[in-house]
Image (spheres, rainbow, N blue to C red):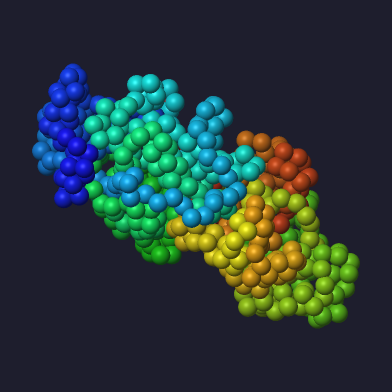
Amino acid sequence: MRATAYKQRLVRGQSPSYERLQAHHAKAGNQPCEPQRIHCGWGRLLIGHTYPRAEALATDLLGEQPGQRDIALYVAAPQQVLAYAPQQLFLDPSDTLRLWFSDYRPARRRFRGFSIRPVQTSSDWSAVNCLYVQRGMLPVDVEQLTPREQGGPSYWLAEDARGAVIGSVMGLNHRKAFDDPEGGSSLWCLAVAADCPCPGVGEALVRHLVEHGMSRGLSYLDLSVLHDNQQAKALYRKLGFRPLQTFAIKRRNGINQALFLGPGPDAALNPYARIIVDEAQRRGIEVQVDDAPAGLFTLSHGGRRIRCRESLSDLTSAVSMTLCADKQLTHRAWAQAGLSQPAQQLAAGAPANAEFLARHGRVVVKPVNGEQGQGVAVDLRDAEALERAIMRARQFDARVLLESYHPGHDLRIVVIGYEVVAAAIRHPAMVVGDGLHRIEQLIEAQSRRRAAATAGESRIPLDEETLRTLRDAGYALDSILPAGTRLAVRKTANLHTGGTLEDVTARLHPQLSEAAVCAARALEIPVVGLDLLVESADRPAYVLIEANERVGLANHEPQPTAERFIDLLFPLSRPQG
């Protein structure tokens, strides 16, 4: 069968078939094609049109191992497969797209700031798996992979100029995997780091697989994308992908239950509430969503009932919450505990404010009662800028604090039950120049990526604080940032204003852990996020900045923040073993 005829059939909506595949093998004098199962490290790809009977495919899907995710693709008659196990299998609500290489057009621009290479070493796999877990995907078990010489997959990574892994993708050569007569290939597990400042990483990884396949004489690239992922679909349409009328089937499990159960009352919860609700449901704890947009829910188990707003629960007293919310009270409580803090005073008249600035040289302005970095200005050095910052801060609270500025890395430590559970260095919003686009365009593009990666929780505001940060660095919004230049566009590292996290839990200095626990005990708060300025995560010097009574647990995956939170609320629900 000629490739042109095969392509025409697919354009009319026909899937690859078992009969056509066997006819190809017979014509070539080969042995009949056996059912093909390719292990990808997170589960198996079952090639549907290599199975002679629907029952055989259903049986293989039912053999999925715990904690893995098998996918049967190119299933021409899914109703026949589902009929054998209708309570255990389901039709995947994803669209399959295909790009014929004859329709492919190379990129008109160069992708700068990163490179793409194969995953090779154990450290590569560790970094890729960390990325996959961060994006809510299953990690790759390298020991389970079908070897490349037996048709197994290839994994590629994108790394930036510092050697950090910022993206990954898996490719499968169908000719090697199951002797595909049309020489196809497919793309799986595309992921880009949520904190990636480099534009075009996802597109570059897709193009890499396309061009790699073309260099091997292959004909097309297939991929599967969730039906409502409009951002990804827009990229694929731009590259020339078109819908392929075929189906995929999966086995029902805890990993994919949202796909077959559909949206429930908790569907509108933000990521900070959902991570807790998911862990509670995993343990059999009853969840009642009280106000999804506000992140309010009630957990019940064994006669115990606790209300939560994200990680703020009934276990946090009103007094402890007040001590966190009012930064003056926080400062006094920590002073009594002997903890290191910046100098602090309330903003008053211009002469008193100027005197505080003269005494400390560099100043931070923040509302007494504020959150998410609103109204905060950092590293102010002249009286005029100080007064403007105070006026902006008063939009969020009539009382405004002045604090001495201390350079260093912004460290967030999560304490649950007076134990350190996670620690991360928070980096301010940053863009990387390409020598072509204005800084304003780079900020808008990075803001869209941050919003997409955080379900809308993180964006870079184009406000006075961003403009001041650019001016201090010698730039304006219409400046062209040189290619490869990294520019911080905010001085605060708050996640809600585009900041990113670098997990440092494993190398946190013991004295920093002790200071964090002491700070939590001084406030008598069982769950808290503490902000410190440090020389380094593995050095003891610190300055405590503030406490957050409603810490975003989802920001610290893969650390077990949600697990420890539910342990605190419901100790008897703790998993055994």
422 or 244: nearer the viewer: 244
In the displayed structure, 504 sits above or below 314; it is above
In the image, residue 236 sits, relative to residue 365, either above or below, namely: above
Q: Which residue is rendered at x = 41% and y = 36% of the image?
A: 215
Question: How many dots with numbers?
Answer: 0
- Residue 347 location (% of width, % of height): 77, 75
409 up-or-down from 322: above or below:
above
**552 on left or right of 472:** left
Q: Report the residue at 46% width, 52% height from top.
A: 107
Residue 481 in percent (x, y) is at: 66, 61
The image shows residue 82 at horizontal and vertical percentages of: 14, 39
Q: Which image quadrant for residue 371? A: bottom right
- Drawn side of residue 148 relative to residue 518, left or right: left
What residue is rendered at 28% in x and 52% in y? 242
- In this picture, residue 206 sits left or right of residue 223: right
Question: Where the C terminus falls, by quadrant?
Answer: top left
Please, is residue 122 above or below residue 300 in the view? above
Q: Which image quarter holds the N terminus? A: top left
Among the 4 quarters of the image, the one containing residue 250:
top left
Q: Observer-nearest residue: 17 or 103?
A: 103
Q: Viewer-proximal residue, 433 or 273?
A: 433
- Determine the residue positioned at 67% across, 46% down: 516
Q: Is residue 558 visible?
A: no
Asked whether residue 292 is in view, the answer is yes
Q: Nearer the viewer, residue 58 or 514?
A: 58
Residue 453, image x, y percentages: 47, 54
